[in-house]
Amino acid sequence: METDLTSVVIGIAALAAFIVPILYLDYYKKWASKQLEKKFLDIARQHNATIAQSDSWRGRYVIGVDKNAGILVYLKKMRGEEDKHVVIGLSGIINAQKKTSRHHATRSS
């Protein structure tokens, strides 16, 4: 059985057409995540915070805390606008509670 060179080339091109965009998107997401983390750490440094624990999600949000300095830093990446960040000094917070919103559907008879 002979392998046709044209079929092999078409097969490789088709495979590349599917794999290259996936690899590009993966690379871009990693690059964007590193850029967001870098910006987040720069904001923390500007406020003399050393972030020991942080979390990011959806590629747009990062939150972290410096337990030693008592500083919480939050960054939201905005689309088409300047990114927003909040820095909160935790030393002045005495009491905090988690608020939950509960929606109850009631049915009238």
Image: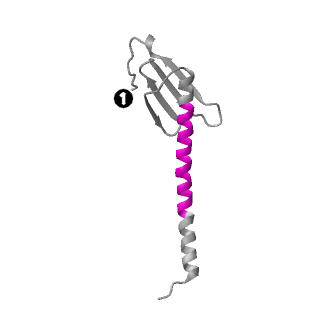
Q: Is residue 83 left or right of residue 54?
A: right
Residue 25, placed above or below residue 84: below
Identify which residue is drawn at 47% across, 89% down: 1
Q: Quadrant of the C terminus?
A: top left
* Residue sitting farthest toward the left: 109
Q: Which residue is mark 1?
A: 106
In the rendered image, residue 34 lying in the magenta stretch gets the answer yes
Identify which residue is drawn at 50% across, 18% down: 88
Identify which residue is drawn at 57% across, 64% down: 17
Q: Which of these two is toward me, 87 or 97?
A: 87
Query: What percent of the width, then of the height, locates residue 41?
Result: 53, 30
Residue 38, placed above or below residue 85: below
Query: What percent of the width, then of the height, locates residue 89?
Result: 48, 16
In the rendered image, residue 64 lying in the magenta stretch gets the answer no
Identify which residue is drawn at 54% across, 77% down: 8
Secondary structure, magenta segment, majority class: helix
Q: Which of these two is toward me, 106 or 10?
A: 10
Amino acid of disc 1? Thr
Residue 2, placed above or below residue 91: below
Q: Tell me the crowding category of disc 1: few under 14, some 14 to 19, or many 20 or more residues within 10 angstroms, Cα based.
A: few
Query: What percent of the width, then of the height, locates residue 12?
Result: 54, 71
Residue 74, placed above or below residue 91: below
Q: Is residue 102 left or right of residue 4?
A: left
* Residue sitting farthest toward the bottom: 1
Q: Is residue 29 left or right of residue 102?
A: right
Q: Which residues are magenta?
A: 18-40
Query: What percent of the width, then of the height, locates residue 39?
Result: 57, 32
User: Looking at the image, how many numbered discs can be counted on the residues?
Assistant: 1
